[in-house]
Amino acid sequence: MRAVERMVHGLEAVVRLFGWIAAWICVVLVILVAGDVLMRYLFRIGAVWFQELQWHLISPIALFGMSYALYSGEQVRVDVFYERFPEGLRRTIEVTGGLLLLAIGLYAAWLTLPWVSQSWLRNEGSPNPGGLPWRWALKSLITLGFVLLAMQSLAHVLRHAFALPPRGE
């Protein structure tokens, strides 16, 4: 039982790290957007790479944030019904939903591998003149995001299947 608990804590620690990274990327994105608006409207200066950087930063926020949302218990569910269910049924729902999400996360990550490897092999960059040269890195985040979701789904399943105590206890 201790081994399962350590594994769950390890998986969740990785997800927390990427959640922290996503949170700081949000701060950076707000600063970049504000700077872009000031540069364009006050000084009439703009750059393609600067605008591309902004939408590139949205990707890790969403991709890392989905696993952090599951970690935090902020996933979508119909609480008006869920809260009225007995504890055993709630655990069954959590384990079943977690297993489905684990399968979806792994399948989505697997589907992205050929696409991402092709991007790496081509050293893919922006098709826009003056754009960012690292499109392959952005595409790699898709695979990483779904692997993180699968990891957190596994931790979620184990936490509920073994009735581990809530985080922080």
Image (cartoon, rainbow, N blue to C red):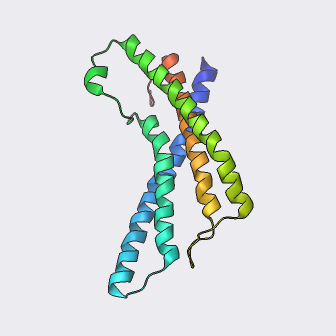
Percent x, y for residue 17? 54, 46
Indicate the position of residue 129 as horizontal and vertical percent values: 57, 78
Identified at 51% across, 17% down, the residue is: 161
The structure residue drawn at horizontal position 60% and vertical position 55%, both measured from the top left corner, is 139
Q: Nearer the viewer, residue 64 or 102?
A: 102
Q: Residue furthest bottom?
A: 43
| Image height of 69 relative to 3, above or below | below
Q: Viewed as shown, does residue 67 lie left or right of 106? A: left
Check the picture and name the quadrant holding the N terminus. top right
Tell me if 166 is positioned left or right of 120 in this view. left
Q: Residue at x 57, y 29 (%)?
A: 103
Seen from the viewer's position, the closer of residues 76 and 17 is 76
Picture coordinates of residue 45, whole percent (x, y): 42, 85
**Number of marks present in the image shown:** 0
Task: List x then y, in percent, for residue 41.
Answer: 33, 83
| Residue at horizontal 57 percent and vertical 24 percent from the top | 5
Is residue 14 at least partly visible in the picture? no
Can residue 135 be seen in this snapshot?
A: yes
Quadrant of the rendered structure where residue 40 is? bottom left
Vertical comparison of 157 with 106: above or below: above
The answer to whether 34 is drawn above or below residue 21 in the figure is below
Snapshot quadrant of residue 14 = top right
- Residue furthest to the left: 80
